[in-house]
Image (spheres, grey):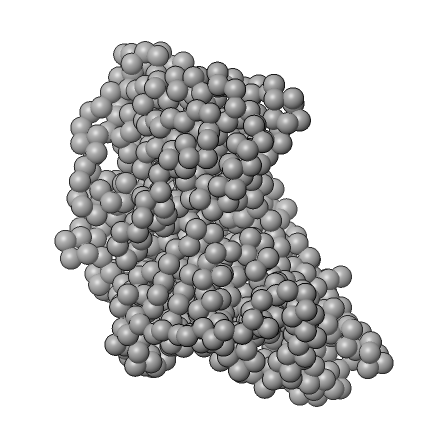
Amino acid sequence: MAKVRDIVLMDKPGERVLLLGNEAIARGALEANIAVYAAYPGTPSSELTDTMAMVAQKAGVYMEYSTNEKVAFETALAAAWSGLRAMTAMKHVGLNVAADTFLSAVGMGVEGGFVIMVADDPSMWSSQNEQDTRVYAKFANVPVFEPISPHEAKEMTKYAFELSEKFKHFVLLRTTTRSSHARGDVVLGELPEEIKQGKRKFGEFKKDPSRFVDVPANARRFHPQILEKIEKIREELAECPFNWIEGKEDAKVGIIAPGLAYAYVKEALAWLGVNDVKVLKLGTPFPVPYKLLEKFLEGLERVLIVEELEPVVEEQVKTWVFDKGLTIEIKGKELVPRVYEMTTRRAVTAIAQFLGLETPVDFAKIDEKYEKVKTIAPPRPPSLCPACPHRNSFYAIRKAAGSKAIFPSDIGCYTLGVLPPLKTVDTTVAMGASIGIAHGLSVASGEKQIIVATIGDSTFYHTGLPALANAIYNRSNVLIVVLDNFVTAMTGDQPNPSTGETPHGPGKRIPIEEIAKAMGADFVAVVDPYDIKKTYETIKEALKVKGVSVVVSRQICALHRIGQMRRRGEKWPLYTVNEEKCTGCKICINAYGCPAIYWSEEKKKAQVDPIMCWGCGGCAQVCPFGAFEPIKEGEQ
Amino acid sequence: MKDYNIVITGVGGQGVLTASQILGWAALRAGYKVRVGEVHGMSQRFGSVIAYVRFGEDVYGAMVPEGKADVIMAFEPVEALRYINYLKEGGLVIANSKPIPPVQVSMGLAKYPSMEEIRNIIENEFKAKLIAFDAEELAIKAGHAITTNTVLIGALTQTPEFPLSAEHVKEVIRLSVPPKAVEVNMKAFDLGVQAARELLGL
């Protein structure tokens, strides 16, 4: 099991390796001779960016963690304008942030291949909504590819660069959680000489204001050009290696399976023992290649479209069939749910229903039996880590501001502050929204309501900055606590301007308190949340100030710190409960809620799980009876 | 072989993803077509975690459907129960018996079921076999609690009709861990094998 970095850089064409979907895309980008990569991390896209960070220098690729998706998009776009192959990546909601540039610049096209990787999250395993990027593809008239496996993801990436360059158009590569976070066997291809030698590639921007300045006179030309391009691409895609027809040639029944749904359809057909159907596998859900569709529909009487989320393919197919005046029964969203992710169970159920068959296992019976499990298995939602500095910040905020205060928060690990016992998150919407919402709530209450917003360091740079400027400019009355843990923790500890580190060495550090001061905040302070008393006192003081207060609560992410300590072989203190001092008051559990602390029903005392304790000592500060004591150096 | 399906469950941070990767590599090195399904991001933070390892000819998507897993390997008793609907009738559950009570239980908002309650549902309702033992204790005996997942993988290889040999899987672990951790992992693996053989009466 070699290291990911070594596998992705491996110069052994034909070698079979196991790669995560996102890692396979990174390899595909290298095989395509990418020159510039810029992205802001977001689950489930992050490992692509992290893999690029690991290999970029060795491969001679310019790579950066940008501060948000819009600037990342622009960075990569300008490189593509300069004739270089460039890529950006984001989670689905990241495209909302980049959408202004995406939809405005699409008509200008590109010179070098430009691939926009967007990772959707059906069922919302780590997201705030369930939007379907394929709808954006249709909106922008940009082709979208969707892989069925890590290997296909790699191959599609290469093809996407070529297609983009051929038509001088943007190309979307859309994954979902289940393709980005699936590992599979991948066969390595050739690496270009420049990548092998690690030679950085440079481009040249050729001025053409009639193309790159979107004043109305120019922009009016773009729209018809885009429509012409997408129809040419639709024709081209009938020949693309990721779209094909398989199964029984003279079948009366057909199944259309776009993207990853193909994988579930294949498994479903095998499980059901059905082999007398024809299948249209679509790697490009938009635009549907009509030539291939026409060939597929020949001889068919009934068609089922097994599609995840929005009926993007269904609408194109139905429109085409209607326009041709064909009479074919087409079923889609009547049998396949429009919400949440596609599964084999869903595919089996829809196909069985469509064909009038029994499912191979009685899912309803399993569900019925499972009811009992639901009643006795206690819930285990994700929680803030042991020693997480956010826990201490929330604890201090809640104590200082009281439960009547309103707590707008933001997107990051600290969203978990919504859970009991902390319950210090009243709203979260989108990246950077905490400050705008806090300001609006303050306006609505006539500046009387106590409002304490929380936002992480990375989110602050991402979209918090304009919101802070607005609040200060418009004389808001809010307290903003920036939870600065030095990394973009939720997505995997990526660096950001808080430390100024980059994957390739030092960038420039931008201290949050200096920004707040420069913008004119009425109160600015920096605290260490591992000192709960001082944090509490500072928040109390900030709440007395009328205007915009900014408190930077700064302490390194515990998970990040422990990871570093483990790698260096360092130890940390462990805490234990002095059972003579513990009165069983449960403050540590009911108000603080560290996952390393649990309740012993037998002893009626709190206990610390030594394997989970990461030694921050917050419990010792919270306990009124001094029952938590450090014992020894841990060695996890 | 058409397909072999393993479901791995536990608590974020216990090493579920590492275990799934090791098994994925082991299957790849045995020449199979492989899919490993993982969830990253928020669910990794001490929440309930599930991963899937599948290999064989008929393997396409990365998720094992309900009712199709051949075996469940659980790092924690309640997490064995929570995903029992993935197991086929007559399948096997290999579980670490050491519980990690969720914060909700300590707060008195939920109750942690007894091992008997868990066994009752798994064996009587879902018609499956459960073997449970303190894998963490064996890991500590081997030299470090962090090898709990190796103990469990060792046990997993003793599943009747498991398509990969114990020696093959052990070799992949030997190649995967840092050199200084090889010995303790090898010991942990053997303790897992031994525990499973005793419980399965082999």
Q: Give coordinates of residue A348: x percent, y percent.
A: 63, 65
Q: Is residue A452 above or below residue A137?
A: above
In this image, A116 relative to A369: left or right? left
Quadrant of image for the N terminus of chain A: bottom left
Residue B80 visible to the viewer: no
Q: Give coordinates of residue A506: x percent, y percent.
A: 27, 51
Q: Nearer the viewer, residue A115 or A354?
A: A115
Q: Give coordinates of residue B81: x percent, y percent.
A: 48, 44
Q: Which residue is drawn at the image coordinates 33% and 80% (left, top)?
A: A192
Quadrant of image for the C terminus of chain A: top left
Q: How many marks?
A: 0
Q: Which residue is drawn at the image coordinates 35% and 38% (left, top)?
A: A511
Q: Is residue A521 above or below residue A491?
A: above
Q: Is residue A372 above or below residue A7?
A: above
- Residue B14, picture quadrant: top left
In this image, B176 relative to A475: left or right? left
In this image, A48 relative to B61: left or right? left
